[in-house]
Amino acid sequence: MQADPAALFVSDSGTGDPAVVFVHGFGADHRVWDAAAAPLPPTTRVLACDLPGHGLSLDAEGAGSAKSAARALLAYLSRCGIDRAHVVGHSMGGAVAALMALAEPGRVASLTLLAPGGFGPEINGPLLRRYAEAADRHELRACLQAMSGESAVVPDDQLDTGLAMRERPGQIEKLVEIAAAITRGERQGVIPAEALATLAMPATVLWGTADPVLPFAQSDGLPARFHRQVIEGAGHMLVGEAPDAVRQAIMANLAAA
C-alpha cells in the first residue's frame, strides 16, 4: 500500500518505454485489468491505477471527477519520469483517458477506450446507483449481470475482488457519493466532440451494441481519426465480455504508435 493514504494508488510493474496505463471504470479497481495486461511483452511497463475514491485510492483527492482523476494520473506519471504512455480506459476510466490526452496530448501515445464515459449525455443512473450500494455477493452479481450482455456470465473472481474492495470502511459510502455526482439529473458530463477531433494519436473505441449503461449510439459520430470497433451483443463490461477484442485493440495501438 502507498505510504500516503491520500495519494493516488498505482500498481507499477515491469520496464519499457512507452508504458501502458490502465484506468478502470466506476466501482472497480486496478485488478480488473490483470487478464488484459497478461499478454503484453514482459519488457512492457504496466501501470494500473485505482481511481480516486476507489480501493487503495479511497481517500485520494478528486473522487467523482474524471478531470481531477486525469490530472492526478498525469502528475503521477510526471513524478515517475514517464514522458509518454499508451492509455487504456473503461467507462469512467475512458473519460479519464480521453481527458488526459486532451490536457497533454504529447504525453499519450495511443488511446484504447472501452465504452467510454463522456461521449454523450445519456447514462443509466438508476443502475449505477444500485451498483454503488451493492453490499453482498447476490446483489453485486445482479448488478454486474444487468450491466452485461444477455449471454455474459459474471466471473467469480470479479465478484471476489469487487466484494473485497467494498469491505473497506467507507468504500460503499464513497461509491454512493460518486454515483450521485456522475448521474446528477440522469445525465453525465460530455467531452466536446470538437475537442476530441483535435487528438492525433491512434485512438480505438470499442462499444457493445447491447450496452445498458452508456448507449451504443454514443459511438456514432466519432472523430474521423477514431477507429470504432463494434462488439455485437456485448453489454458494458467489455473487459470481461470481450477480452480477446480488448487485448487485440491494445496490441494494435501499441504497434500503430
Image (cartoon, rainbow, N blue to C red):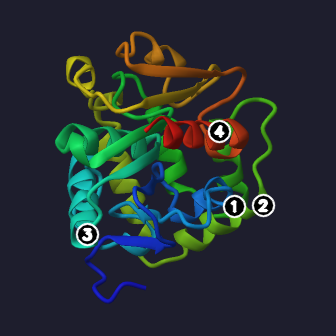
Q: Is residue 217 left or right of residue 156?
A: left
| Foreground label between 4 and 2 | 4
Q: Amino acid at mark 4?
A: Gln
The first of marks 1 and 4 along the sequence is: 1
The first of marks 4 and 2 along the sequence is: 2
Q: Is residue 27 left or right of residue 121?
A: right
The first of marks 4 and 3 along the sequence is: 3
Residue in the foreground of this view, choosing between 43 and 119? 43
Residue ID for mark 4: 248
Spatial CA distance of label 4 from label 3 is 28 Å
Does 153 sit above or below residue 53?
above
The first of marks 2 and 3 along the sequence is: 3
Q: Amino acid at mark 3?
A: Gly
Spatial CA distance of label 2 from label 3 is 37 Å
Give yes or no for contact between labels 1 and 2 (Cβ–Cβ under 8 Å): yes
Residue ID for mark 2: 156
Residue in the foreground of this view, choosing between 184 and 211? 211
Spatial CA distance of label 1 from label 3 is 35 Å
Number of callouts in the render?
4
Q: Amino acid at mark 1?
A: Leu
Residue 135 visible somewhere in the drawing: no
Residue ID for mark 3: 81
Residue ID for mark 1: 159
Question: At which x and y percent is residue 76?
Answer: 26, 67
Q: Is residue 51 left or right of residue 133?
A: left
